[in-house]
């Protein structure tokens, strides 16, 4: 008999209203996979892009969808079944993961559901010191910060540039994080601090208390002053915002420094950067269970924490997407399941 579950499915691209909470086939654990009973899933920008049909991407990058599809990459939950050839995980284990990213860009990674099958290599034991909501909020944002700042963790070709991204030493250096109040930003602040950097956080004023609590040494409220008019002699800028005029950050970076772009689309300052001896680099985050296990120790002992903006029941995923599209979040939006 075919087993069913509840999931949030997409039968067409569009606004938040196209997200439908309905019955779907429950997946099974194939060889090398683990079936996870989801307790929480979090929202990430790729979820919004896919729901909208990736219209913001150049046409040749737009994926061919197969409907219906289930959005979502980030989960925390409990192992319900283990496929052949899997060791290190057993039924009842609490686990977390970023599922099949960027592999399943076009068809969705299926995290907005009661169950999801996950390749064992992408899974890690959930840090015992945090709850499922915080664990679900971590994977994509934390892996992005980790792969940009600590360790790339793979040798795949870089789809965003001709050379592999390489983190730079941060101990004793000054790092500016733009978009520090968001999912990637608040974790980048903490990771850079853990690596021994002096950190300047750029965000709107409502985030100042949180970011100072996360370890920021200096705070710039971009609604009152442009970061490039305040900061100077920075070794690294990591921009978690993207959009227009990322080139402005070249003015605050020391010769020999670096500009890391989480979303590099639209950056046009490569020639200027080369003249100044500034490395401009980007990378696409990739699923990595071993890195989640390593970073998980920092979540477990409180060195790094995941801030949750708000939670919504899975059935209200469309409301969560509406909230996300308004922006200005502090940390992550999480869907609670069951």
Image (cartoon, rainbow, N blue to C red):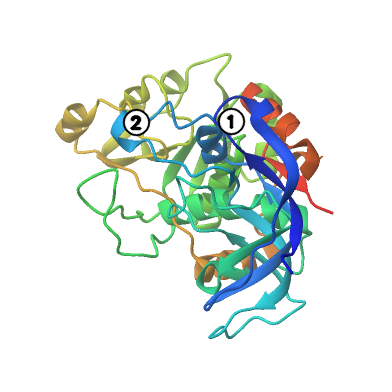
- Say few, some or many: other residues with alpha carbon within 10 Å of mark 2 (under 14 / 14 to 19 / 20 or more): some
Q: Is residue 157 left or right of residue 203?
A: left
Number of callouts: 2
**Is residue 155 placed above or below 142 in the rendered structure?**
below
**Residue 264 circle label:** none
- Say few, some or many: other residues with alpha carbon within 10 Å of mark 1 (under 14 / 14 to 19 / 20 or more): many
Residue found farthest to the front: 1
Q: Is residue 89 left or right of residue 31?
A: right
The percent coordinates of residue 209 (x first, y second) are 72, 33
The percent coordinates of residue 90 (x first, y second) are 69, 82
- At a point 79% along the width and 59% down the height, the residue shown is 131
- At a point 68% along the width and 48% down the height, the residue shown is 112
- At a point 21% along the width and 51% down the height, the residue shown is 163
The percent coordinates of residue 158 (x first, y second) are 28, 51
**Which of the two labelled residues, at mark 1 and mark 2, occupies the earlier sequence position?**
1
In whole angstroms, how far apart are the C-alphas of marks 1 and 2?
26 Å
**Is residue 86 placed above or below 196 in the rendered structure?**
below
**Residue 265 circle label:** 2
**Is residue 195 placed above or below 199 in the rendered structure?**
below
Residue found farthest to the top: 224
- Of residues 149 and 100, the one nearer the viewer is 100
The answer to whether residue 171 is seen in the rendering is no
Q: Which residue is mark 1?
A: 219
Q: Is residue 319 left or right of residue 143?
A: right
- At a point 77% along the width and 65% down the height, the residue shown is 129
The percent coordinates of residue 71 (x first, y second) are 59, 45
Q: Quadrant of the C terminus?
A: bottom right
Q: Is residue 107 left or right of residue 270?
A: right
Task: Report helix, strand or loop for mark 2.
Answer: loop
């Amino acid at each position: 008999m075919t087993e069913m579950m509840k999931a949030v499915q997409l039968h067409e691209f569009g606004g938040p209203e196209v997200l439908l909470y309905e019955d779907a086939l429950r997946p099974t654990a194939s060889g090398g996979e683990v079936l996870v009973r989801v307790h929480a899933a979090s929202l990430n920008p790729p979820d919004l892009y896919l729901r909208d049909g990736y219209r913001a991407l150049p046409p040749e990058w737009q994926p061919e969808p197969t409907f219906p599809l289930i959005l979502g990459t980030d989960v925390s939950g409990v192992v319900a079944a283990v496929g052949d050839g899997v060791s290190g995980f057993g039924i009842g284990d609490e686990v977390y993961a970023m599922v099949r990213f960027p592999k399943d860009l076009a068809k969705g990674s299926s995290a907005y559901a009661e169950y999801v099958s996950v390749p064992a290599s992408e899974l890690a034991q959930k840090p015992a010191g945090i709850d499922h909501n915080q664990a679900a909020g971590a994977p994509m944002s934390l892996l992005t910060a980790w792969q940009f700042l600590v360790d790339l963790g793979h040798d795949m070709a870089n789809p965003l540039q001709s050379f592999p991204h390489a983190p730079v030493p941060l101990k004793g250096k000054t790092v500016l994080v733009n978009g520090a109040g968001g999912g990637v930003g608040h974790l980048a602040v903490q990771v850079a601090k853990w690596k021994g950097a002096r950190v300047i956080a750029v965000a709107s004023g409502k985030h100042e208390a949180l970011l100072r609590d996360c370890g920021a040494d200096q705070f710039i409220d971009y609604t009152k002053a442009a970061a490039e008019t305040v900061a100077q002699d920075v070794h690294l800028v990591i921009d978690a915002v993207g959009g227009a005029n990322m080139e402005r950050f070249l003015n605050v970076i020391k010769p020999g420094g670096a500009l890391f772009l989480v979303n590099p689309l639209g950056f046009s300052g490569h020639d200027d950067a080369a003249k100044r001896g500034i490395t401009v680099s980007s990378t696409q985050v990739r699923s990595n269970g071993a890195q989640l296990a390593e970073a998980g120790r920092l979540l477990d002992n409180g060195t790094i924490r995941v801030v949750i903006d708000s939670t919504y029941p899975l059935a209200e995923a469309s409301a969560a997407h509406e909230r996300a599209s308004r922006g200005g979040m502090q940390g992550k939006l999480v869907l609670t399941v069951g």
